[in-house]
Image (cartoon, rainbow, N blue to C red):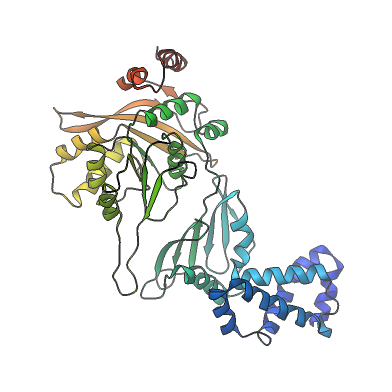
């Protein structure tokens, strides 16, 4: 089918236009190569992105002056140019998915499969990359400005995009049907505890309790599985930190959004470079944070040997610190932390668990329901049993999977101290306890 025939079909109906846009776009890409040097575009894109875009627009105008394109209306021309710019400089077929604030994750399983997550549910799309080369070009475009490299010798990359989104890329030979690209998106809007209550993720009594815990400087570990809402809750808790306290955040890839707080120092770990040097670990950053006069230390995710230094900080004057870790239950989080500490210190298990119990005031479990909804399922306090030599998880609040409400089963002793701390008065504490059926 000739270009003019495709243009006539495209002009007949909206459905036809959608069907043949890809063919027209392919023709436009092919002709562009004869008008603009690809090497020059790549150089401009690094040094002067707007100049590179203008070069493409000018070349497209010249192409559209040709007789073969005479039947293409202005609106279709504009749409083709925008799609071409997205392919060359943006995220290509992923561009509008990245721009959609309601989408939280974009997943690419090779050139022929694109999915996204919305409201906790994965949705398949009919989007495709033209060929493996187009997907690989997108990967190079993502990593180029970040100074990162991916190839057979180093086939896995974790990075942070300029928009703040986290990207993981895996390429062959590790990725059998790859390349695989996973983009975890983070909204500029930070969800508060009040908004979580409105959505049903947090009950009113839990919202009040967690706000009190943060203001009373109780160190909190948010635990849960992948995608269960740990980082979202951690951000919400940060809103409750008083404005006159200094916060140091430590992350593998910067995801936390402490926009509203006036004094936040953000630290991000760095992987080794192509020469195998220059790595800065989470543990190094935790140690360094202690020299930055923090009132609170927030570790985005505790996953290794940094656990020892984090617990030490919590036990030596940095109460009220926050972290997340992967665990299927509050009790499991204790064993996970114990294992992490033993990565770097051959300490007796009972000594480690005693430190965990004294360092962490609360463990908050997040879960994702089958319908995609994220919610707080458990709140526990920790205590050390000297006779058994073990750290115990004492349940305070429980909410079953699928339930609209949870149940308070106990209240920690420090709630009675809130009036003395100036966090809440006696009337507020009494009203909360009555609402929880704990009075």
Quadrant of residue 337 in the image? top left
Residue at horizontal 85%, vertical 79%?
70
Measured as percent of width and height from the top left, residue 106 is found at 54, 57
Q: Is residue 378 left or right of residue 281?
A: right
Residue 316 at least partly seen? yes
Q: Is residue 206 left or right of residue 85?
A: left
Identify which residue, 368 or 317, lies in the foreground: 317
Question: Which quadrant of the rendered structure holds the N terminus?
Answer: bottom right
The reply to whether residue 411 is visible in this rendering is: no
Q: Quadrant of residue 356?
A: top left
* Closer to us: 257 or 408: 257
Q: Position of residue 60 (x, y in %)?
A: 73, 78
Which residue is more in the foreground, 412 or 40?
A: 40
Q: Is residue 8 above or below residue 244?
A: below
Q: Is residue 192 left or right of residue 249?
A: right
For residue 187, above or below residue 407: below
Q: Quadrant of the C terminus?
A: top left
At horizontal 41% and vertical 65% (from top left) the residue drawn is: 157
Residue 381, given in percent of the width and then of the height, sits at 31, 29
Image position of 128 with respect to 372: above or below: below
Residue at the image position 13 percent from the left and 45 percent from the top = 347
Query: Position of 126 compared to 201: left or right?
Result: right
Residue 81 image-quadrant placement: bottom right
Viewer-side residue, 406 vs 322: 322
Instruction: Name the residue at the bottom extreme.
Output: 34
């Amino acid at each position: 089918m000739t270009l003019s025939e495709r243009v006539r079909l495209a002009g007949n109906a909206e459905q036809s236009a959608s069907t043949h846009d890809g063919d027209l776009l392919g023709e436009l890409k092919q002709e562009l190569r004869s008008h603009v040097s690809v090497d020059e575009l790549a150089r401009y894109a690094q040094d002067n992105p707007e100049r590179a875009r203008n070069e493409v627009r000018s070349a497209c105008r010249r192409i559209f002056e040709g007789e073969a394109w005479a039947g293409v209306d202005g609106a279709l021309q504009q749409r083709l140019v925008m799609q071409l710019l997205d392919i060359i400089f943006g995220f290509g077929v992923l561009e509008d998915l990245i721009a959609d604030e309601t989408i939280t994750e974009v997943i690419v399983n090779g050139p022929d499969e694109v999915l996204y997550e919305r409201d906790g549910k994965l949705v398949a799309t009919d989007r495709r990359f033209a060929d493996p080369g187009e997907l690989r070009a997108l990967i190079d475009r993502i990593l180029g400005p970040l100074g990162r490299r991916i190839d057979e010798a180093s086939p896995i990359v974790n990075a942070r995009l300029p928009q703040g989104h986290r990207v993981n890329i895996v390429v062959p030979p590790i990725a059998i049907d790859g390349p695989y690209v996973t983009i975890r998106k983070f909204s500029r809007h930070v969800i508060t505890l009040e908004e979580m209550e409105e959505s049903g993720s947090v009950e009113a009594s839990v919202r009040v309790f967690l706000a009190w815990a943060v203001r009373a400087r109780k160190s909190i570990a948010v635990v849960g599985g992948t995608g269960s809402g740990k980082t979202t809750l951690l951000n919400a808790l940060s809103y409750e930190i008083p404005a006159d306290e200094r916060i140091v955040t430590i992350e593998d890839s910067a995801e936390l959004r402490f926009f509203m707080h006036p004094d936040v120092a953000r630290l991000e770990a760095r992987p080794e470079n192509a020469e195998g040097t220059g790595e800065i670990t989470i543990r190094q950053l935790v140690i360094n944070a202690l020299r930055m006069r923090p009132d609170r230390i927030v570790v985005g995710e505790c996953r290794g040997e940094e656990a020892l230094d984090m617990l030490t900080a919590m036990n030596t004057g940095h109460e009220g610190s926050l972290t997340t870790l992967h665990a299927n239950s509050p009790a499991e989080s204790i064993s996970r932390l114990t294992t992490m500490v033993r990565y770097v210190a051959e300490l007796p298990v009972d000594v480690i668990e005693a430190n965990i119990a004294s360092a962490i005031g609360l463990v908050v479990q997040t879960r994702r329901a089958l319908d995609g909804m994220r919610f707080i399922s458990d709140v526990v306090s920790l205590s050390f049993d000297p006779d058994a030599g073990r750290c115990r998880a004492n349940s305070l609040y429980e909410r079953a999977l699928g339930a609209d409400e949870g149940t308070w089963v106990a209240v920690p002793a420090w709630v009675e101290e809130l009036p003395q701390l100036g966090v809440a008065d006696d009337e507020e504490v009494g009203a909360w306890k009555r609402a929880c059926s704990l009075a």
